[in-house]
Amino acid sequence: MKEKHLFYQLNRCTGCQLCVMACSLAREGVCGEKESLISILTHPQFGTSQPLVDQSCMWEECDARCVEVCSPAVLHLVAQEDWGRLMANPDWNPVPIVVGGKHS
Ligand code: SF4
Ligand code: SF4
């Protein structure tokens, strides 16, 4: 399968965790952080949040449910031909990847 990457919009993640629940439900049929390939980091003092993704998300056959449920439209799943366009846009950043994480 072709590699794909999640991108996110800086400073727009609310930390709602809906993407985490959606991924775990689609993958394993349960709502759980350990079954999800996406996780959310929230700063304990400032409350700012951002997504992180397990390396295996790149090759996972999925319907991008995380993107679908994100109501502020923070996430975008991008195929290789569009990586350059997104990288050139200061509003979008690649979601950092956890290499050797729980599902690798
Ligand atoms: S793109 Fe697919 S595998 Fe990756 S976090 Fe979203 S739902 Fe999960
Ligand atoms: S990426 Fe979207 S769905 Fe996930 S926690 Fe942030 S705002 Fe919520």
Image (cartoon, grey):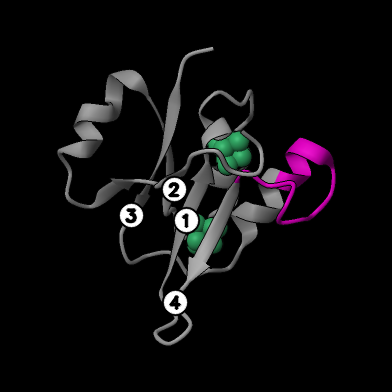
User: 10 Å neighbourhood of mark 2: few (<14), some, or many (≥20)?
Assistant: many
Residue 59 counted in the magenta span = no
- Looking at the rendered structure, the kind of residue marked 1 is Pro
Q: Quadrant of the N terminus?
A: top right
* Residue with the mark numbered 2: 75
For residue 60, what is the image quadrant? top right
The secondary structure type at the circle numbered 1 is: strand
Question: Where is residue 14 shown, x and y percent of the image?
Answer: 48, 70
In this rendering, the answer to whether 63 lies above or below 11 is above
Is 33 magenta? The answer is: yes
Looking at the picture, which amino acid does disc 2 mark? Leu
Query: Is any part of residue 71 visible from this angle?
Result: no
Residue range of the region highlighted in magenta in the rendering = 24-37
Dot label at residue 43: 4
Q: Which residue is mark 1?
A: 51
Outermost front residue: 100
Q: Main secondary structure of the magenta part?
A: loop
